[in-house]
Amino acid sequence: MSKQITRRNALRGAIGGTAVTLGLPFLDCFLNSKGTALAATGAPLPHSLGLWWQGLGLNPGSWEPSTIGRDFELRNELKILEPFKDRLNLYTGTKYFLDGRPLETHTTGYEIASTGGIPMGNSSGPSLDAKVAEVIGRNSRFRSLEISLSGSRNSYSTRGGSTKNPSEGSPVALYTRIFGPDFTDPNVAEFSPDPMVMARRSVLSYVTEQRQKIVRQLGATDRERLDRYFTSLREIEHQLELEMKKPAPLEACTVPGKPSEAQPGTIVTDADVNNRLFGGLVAHALACGQTRVFSIDAGSNGMRKQGSSLTWHMLTHEEPIDEEIGYQKESTWFMNWANAAFAGFLNELDSIPEGDGTLLDRMLVLWQTDHGDARIHSMDALPIMTIGSAGGRMKTGLHISSPGDPATRVGLTVQQAVGVPISAWGERSNQTSKTITEVLV
């Protein structure tokens, strides 16, 4: 059976004379008996890297575990990640070094985390995700995918110098890139997708005959797995189609005055919808081998509640500490919201079975932020997390404390874990050749 169907199989069709391609996920017939390697070559399943950029830190003193090593406690804002604790590593105590350079708030931290140093004009090197994509992303359709929950083009991903990899802020546009007409360079800033191509008829409708032919050759387990995969993709298509349809008229509705224009997705309820759609799309793209690297900007700074003009960023500076509870109540609400969004995204990755595990099990997802305490723009005591084992290359379920060490130690360790041949990373005081050996296999 594996001789008839391989990972090179893809479902192909055409929409309006333009080609569409839909890859296949890892089915049991592609894998060895343990579900840990490719049956045809014996090679391990390819690992992938995801970056989740979430600004404004956490509440200092309220989230750090009291114990080091295993059996640590996820406290307060991080409690929502309890289902992933066994696959999560938490790193505490590290910092970003300024080396006498001025602090550009909510930017410098990300620059150090992503490139290993503070850029001098246009002299910055490639970002961590771009370095990884050069190694593991060359043979995938999209070397990397960049996404923004707020709908902006903001991105911390760079190939070097001033060349940014702009984020995609529209789930419809991302869908069109992945499952619509063949796309050439995913990093071109000018991109005008035609969402009505997808709305007229789904990609799955154009590959029906090939789907049926392949399904007939599969065993019961793989048929069930492929059916779940197609059902999940169809649900995403249906959600996106509903988003694009004109709502039915309501007689009681009157047209108000034109409101001030707001950035799409900066309201948390809008970002929640986008996050679920982006999560499903990225999971499918990874499962089908269309990309192996992604970067997500959670857009924390500009997030606000419906009907409020106060953003999360503004609250971190202007909201007083509640004397009864000892922290900023509204700012903490946003922290909990953002971490719940992250947990929801992880759930999407974890929902796709592969062998004896899931897509998330062969991945490594790096969570980073710009400040330890956004209220005072601190650059130390940073919360950093990794989720997943990079296909067994990292131990998980550990709390690692490294007081005063450069945060780039985590970045160096991550790069080595996913196969980048690198022995040192960073600039000046942020440079390190010291990996976190406790988590490396």
Image: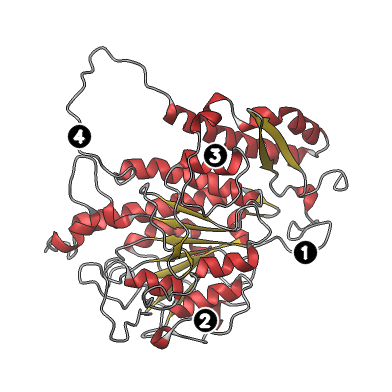
Amino acid type assigned to the residue bearing label 2 in the image:
Ile
Whole-number angstrom distance, CA of label 4 to CA of label 1: 56 Å
Residue in the picture at 59% in, 80% down: 422
Earlier residue among tags 2 and 3: 3
Instruction: Note whether residue 351 is visible.
Output: no
When the figure is inspected, residue 76 is found, relative to residue 380, above or below; the finding is: above
Whole-number angstrom distance, CA of label 1 to CA of label 2: 26 Å
The dot on residue 259 is: 4
Earlier residue among tags 4 and 1: 1
Instruction: Note whether residue 121 is visible.
Output: yes
Indicate the secondary structure of the residue bearing disc 2. loop
Alpha-carbon neighbours of circle 2 within 10 Å: few (<14), some, or many (≥20)?
some
Q: Given this view, does label 4 or label 1 mark the residue nearer the observer?
A: 4
Indicate the secondary structure of the residue bearing disc 4. loop
Earlier residue among tags 3 and 4: 3
State if disc 2 and disc 1 touch (CB < 8 Å).
no
Residue 379 image point, x, y percent = 30, 76
The dot on residue 43 is: 1
Quarter of the image that includes the N terminus = top right
Residue 103 image point, x, y percent = 26, 76
Amino acid type assigned to the residue bearing label 3 in the image:
Thr
Residue at label 3?
A: 176
Amino acid type assigned to the residue bearing label 1 in the image:
Ala
Alpha-carbon neighbours of circle 3 within 10 Å: few (<14), some, or many (≥20)?
many
State if disc 3 and disc 2 touch (CB < 8 Å).
no
Quarter of the image that includes the C terminus = bottom right
Amino acid type assigned to the residue bearing label 4 in the image:
Pro
Residue at label 2?
A: 436
